[in-house]
Amino acid sequence: MQTAQGTTVIKNGQLVDGNGGPPVPDALVIIDNGYIAYAGPHAGAPPVPPEARLLDARGGTIMPGLVEAHFHPTYFNVAALEDLDIKYPVEYVTLLASVNAKLALECGYTSARSGGSLFNIDVWLKRAIENDLVPGPRLAASGREICGVGGLMDWNPDFRKIGMEGLVLLINGPAEGIGAVRKLVKDGVEWIKTYPTGDAAAPDTNDHHTLCMTFEEMHAVVAEAHNHRLKVTGHCRATQGIKNALRAGYDTIEHGTFMDDEALELLLERNTPVVPGLQFEYASIVHGPEYGMSQRVVDGHKETLEGGAESARRILKAGGRLGMGGDYGFAWNPHGTYAKELTFFVRYVGFTPLETITCATRTGAEIMGRDHELGTLEAGKLADVLVVDGDVLRDISVLEDRSRLLAVMQGGIVKAGRYAGAA
Ligand SMILES: [Zn+2]
């Protein structure tokens, strides 16, 4: 991905640098050739060359670009599990994924970690974004997901003889887990996404208290993935699934819904980040019935939301790490509404806006494995910057409103927002 040439200065705004400290009023950010040269108080800033481009934050906020830590680029208005893999052909899903990526960038998300993709679309989408062919967040790709046969993601009955090839690799036993990872290694993914547990979406045989993979399968997947320097994550709702994942050496936990004291202790010992993805649960409860969601499923989502919110609070309080993101692309939780996650954490879970933004920036970059170059506004880092017309610490929901984004920058280039094309 290209970086800007020359110097750009952002002034007249408060700095929220992503590290979680108090905001710096009347800040200055100086960007040299796409990298941050200075981010701090205007008073005491180094001199700025007269030819520098000026960006006026209009009294608003200068902050790191957001990281969507559980991004499904290929999900598009999914209204039923079946829609996930057979709603559209792969050619059309590829185009939709490109549209979703552009939208995410326009929403202020300069980076995203895939939480799983149909076929190998996210790997190639990442390449197209890196080569500046299409706009989108800097991606960490996962490709197909791994699930046990008969588990949450294996819903097509065998008599249909259509399998699940595009969405998941279905495994029986550790040897097949190793085989699935080896296939993904060849596909070029960075993350292996697995399904250790079920979900409220499948109340009959794979609900949120059931397991979809054995510990032995998970351990084999992790050993093979780590050997190839890939990272592993998994959809973990049931308590035992969370513990299995932590003991197997998972690099992150998706959802981490039902955590008991032992699970929390294992998590903190390993400092493993969790991506709760709670707005999805809330939206399912509120809007699911409009899409034919049964009361049993809605009730399951209620239990999941309560458990997930409580776990998130405990993790934050204990000093653990949380990423923001989760499962946008469903009909009731569509792409383009990613920042609702942040508002939800402030209004319903009880995080402060500053805590929430730190999760969505610095921790997001840590999950991406790119915190040395992304996630905070500090000298030496890539200038992935969000300039917001408003005080995000007073009202975090301004981040939901794309018209309030003045500039969405990647490597110092304004890619979206009101200043796009003008700066
Ligand atoms: Zn997901």
Image (cartoon, grey):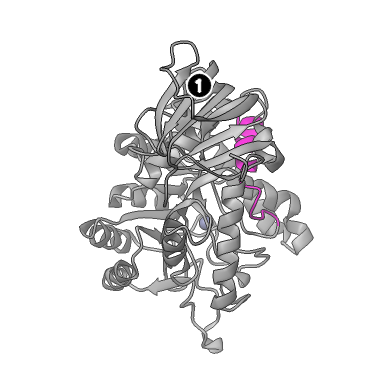
How far across and how far down the image is residue 148, in percent?
41, 69
- Magenta residues, start to end: 332-350
Q: Residue at x 24, y 62 (%)?
A: 224
Identity of the residue furthest to the top in this view: 43
Amino acid on which disc 1 is placed: Leu
Q: Nearer the viewer, residue 412 or 81?
A: 412
From the viewer's perspective, is residue 277 above or below residue 77? Answer: above
Instruction: Inspect the magenta stretch and tell me whether residue 333 lies in it.
Output: yes
How far across and how far down the image is residue 193, in percent?
41, 59
Q: Nearer the viewer, residue 348 or 240?
A: 348
Q: Determine whether, in the image, residue 167 is placed left or right of residue 185.
A: right
User: Which residue is tagged 1?
Assistant: 28
From the viewer's perspective, is residue 373 above or below residue 172? Answer: above
State which quadrant residue 386 falls in: top right
How far across and how far down the image is residue 375, in percent?
43, 36
State which quadrant residue 89 falls in: bottom right
Q: Nearer the viewer, residue 223 or 237?
A: 223
From the viewer's perspective, is residue 296 above or below residue 253? Answer: below
